[in-house]
Image (tube, helix red, strand yellow):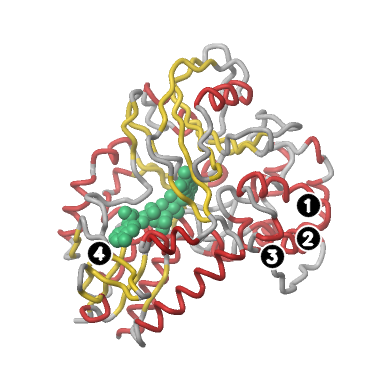
């Protein structure tokens, strides 16, 4: 039986493993940590367990079944349609009072969107993010979106890749007007084409309608051991505490070359997690997360799962409102808000600054207590330089893996591969292609 190695027991890596097993292959997952799930983890804050960031899994029915085999069907809460993704945004001219942002400062943008929908789609080769914005949204659209991306990545937009527009928040946060107008526009299937990442095709289907979103239930906070057991029960080898290294562009498990022991490999983890030198050579920002216990008694209810902060004066990047997607009505989650901040490396802002920003964005809310995630995560900027470095590394790894099937399914901001549906889709597709190459 052909043997496949999967690096990283992220949700994407696990999905690929179950699919490969179903297709009759011998599968081993190597996971650096002592538990599975990758970034989909829970943080034990002084205010109770909270998600690390916010995670919604957009999946196909088939992927839902695979995930149910691993995590248990009862551990997911399912949402459909517009309820899959409810966000708002904040900048100087627009505030959090619509489910989708009201671009009051640029009230013509929805008209431009409509014009774009009605016009012939232009297909040209573009070399950077700025030209991609011009091509898709014209001058006004580019003028609106460029400062938002520059605030997010701390980098000039002309030095970002065209695909960078699909990371961290997607264009749905930008394209619409008030809720009524936005719901109307979202019925137009052409909008999907305009805003979707090519990889949005995974899962196949429309962006706004008919998608299925899975949220982990609170029980899933304590199921790590159950998951490891169910993976073993499915006949998959799970090797925890196993740090796979890239050395001279070859993949090693300890002193053994992966290619000597396996017929194929799926890398379901970002490349920068496999080699420190590569991670250090990239243009990086850091992501810090602040948790706040809040008093909401003097603020109106907010429906948004999250609020993206586009205002360049704010350090905050995204405010995660656990109470809006607290489908199980857990009491402690109503009082907690997380703020994610992308900042230059080693320049984490003070918690008091972020707390004040939170009270500015959500007026009437008072912060009672705060907790900072002790570690900041390094995130590669989707820069043109990073794209070149990572492409070179991918070619070298492929060459050293000789002609055996090798797939890269981890997060790559420069390629617009960021959200869980991108990585799950990429790993699932890799599993299908891998099985067909080995058959
Ligand atoms: C703050 C934040 C907010 C986010 N919000 C959203 C959101 O709202 N919606 C959404 O869909 N996505 C969101 N994402 C993205 C989402 O978390 C990722 O798409 C998803 O986790 C998959 O990422 P990944 O492929 O990089 O795998 P990861 O989740 O990073 O998993 C990689 C796995 O590989 C393991 N690993 C790493 N190095 C090695 C090694 N050398 N050897 C063996 N194993 C290794 C890791 O321990 C980990 O288990 C967010 C991410 C962040 C950081």
Considering depth in this image, is 319 or 424 the residue closer to the camera? 319
Mark 2 and 1 residues: CB-CB less than 8 Å, in contact? yes
Name the residue: 30% across, 66% down.
245
Residue 163, percent across and down?
Answer: 61, 62
Q: CA distance from mark 3 to mark 4?
A: 36 Å
Up-down relation of residue 357 to residue 16 (above or below)? above
Q: Is residue 187 left or right of residue 292?
A: right
Q: Look at discs 3 and 2 and give the one toward the viewer.
A: 3
The residue carrying pointer 4 sits among few (fewer than 14), some (14 to 19) or many (20 or more) residues within 10 Å by Cα, namely many
Q: Which residue is mark 2?
A: 134
Q: Is residue 422 left or right of residue 127?
A: left
Name the residue: 44% across, 66% down.
426
Considering depth in this image, is 341 or 231 the residue closer to the camera? 341
- Lower position in the chain sequence, tag 3 or tag 4: 4
Q: CA distance from mark 1 to mark 4?
A: 44 Å
Q: Which residue is mark 3?
A: 128
Q: Which residue is mark 1?
A: 141
Q: Secondary structure at mark 3?
A: loop
- Residue 41 appears in view: yes
- Lower position in the chain sequence, tag 4 or tag 2: 4
The residue carrying pointer 2 sits among few (fewer than 14), some (14 to 19) or many (20 or more) residues within 10 Å by Cα, namely some
Q: Which residue is mark 4?
A: 29
Q: Residue furthest top?
A: 298
Q: Quadrant of the N terminus?
A: bottom left
Tell me which corner region of the image, top left, top right, bottom left or bottom right, holds residue 60.
bottom left
- Lower position in the chain sequence, tag 1 or tag 4: 4
Mark 4 and 2 residues: CB-CB less than 8 Å, in contact? no
- Residue 65 appears in view: no
Up-down relation of residue 362 to residue 429 (above or below)? above
Give the numbered dot on residue 267. Answer: none
Q: CA distance from mark 3 to mark 2?
A: 10 Å
């Amino acid at each position: 039986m052909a043997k496949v190695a999967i690096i990283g027991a992220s949700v994407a890596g696990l999905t690929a493993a179950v699919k490969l097993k179903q297709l009759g292959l011998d599968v081993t997952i190597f996971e650096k940590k002592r538990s599975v799930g990758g970034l989909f983890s829970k943080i034990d804050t002084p205010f109770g367990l909270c998600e690390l960031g916010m995670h919604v899994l957009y999946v196909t029915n088939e992927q839902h079944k695979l995930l149910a085999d691993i995590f248990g069907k009862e551990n997911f809460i399912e949402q459909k349609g517009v309820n899959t993704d409810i966000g708002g945004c904040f900048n100087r001219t627009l505030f959090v009072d619509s489910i989708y942002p009201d671009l009051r400062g640029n009230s013509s943008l929805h008209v431009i969107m409509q014009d774009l929908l009605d016009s012939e789609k232009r297909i040209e080769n573009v070399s950077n993010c700025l030209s991609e914005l011009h091509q898709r949204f014209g001058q006004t659209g580019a003028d609106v979106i460029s400062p938002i991306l520059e605030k997010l990545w701390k980098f000039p937009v002309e030095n970002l890749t065209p695909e960078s527009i699909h990371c961290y928040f997607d264009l749905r946060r930008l394209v619409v007007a008030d809720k009524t107008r936005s719901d109307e526009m979202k019925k137009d299937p052409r909008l999907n084409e305009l805003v979707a990442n090519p990889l949005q095709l995974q899962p196949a289907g429309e962006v706004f309608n008919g998608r299925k979103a899975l949220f982990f239930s609170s029980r899933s906070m304590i199921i790590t051991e159950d998951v490891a057991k169910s993976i073993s029960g499915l006949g998959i080898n799970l090797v925890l505490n196993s740090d796979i290294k890239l050395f001279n562009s070859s993949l090693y498990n300890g002193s053994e070359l992966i290619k000597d022991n396996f017929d194929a490999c799926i890398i379901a983890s970002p490349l920068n997690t496999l080699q420190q030198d590569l991670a250090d050579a990239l243009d990086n920002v850091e992501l810090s997360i602040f948790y706040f216990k809040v008093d909401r008694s003097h603020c109106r209810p907010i429906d948004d799962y999250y609020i993206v902060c586009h205002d360049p004066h704010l350090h905050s990047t995204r405010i995660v409102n656990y109470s809006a997607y607290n489908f199980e009505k857990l009491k402690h989650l109503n009082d907690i808000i997380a703020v994610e901040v992308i900042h230059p490396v080693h320049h984490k802002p003070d918690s008091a600054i972020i707390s004040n920003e939170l009270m500015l964005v959500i007026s009437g809310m008072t912060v009672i207590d705060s907790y900072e995630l002790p570690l900041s995560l390094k995130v590669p900027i989707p820069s043109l330089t990073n794209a070149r470095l990572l492409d070179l590394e991918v070619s070298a790894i492929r060459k050293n893996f000789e002609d055996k099937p090798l797939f890269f399914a981890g997060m790559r901001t420069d390629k617009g591969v960021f959200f869980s549906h991108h990585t799950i889709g990429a790993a699932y597709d890799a599993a299908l292609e891998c099985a067909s190459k080995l058959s």
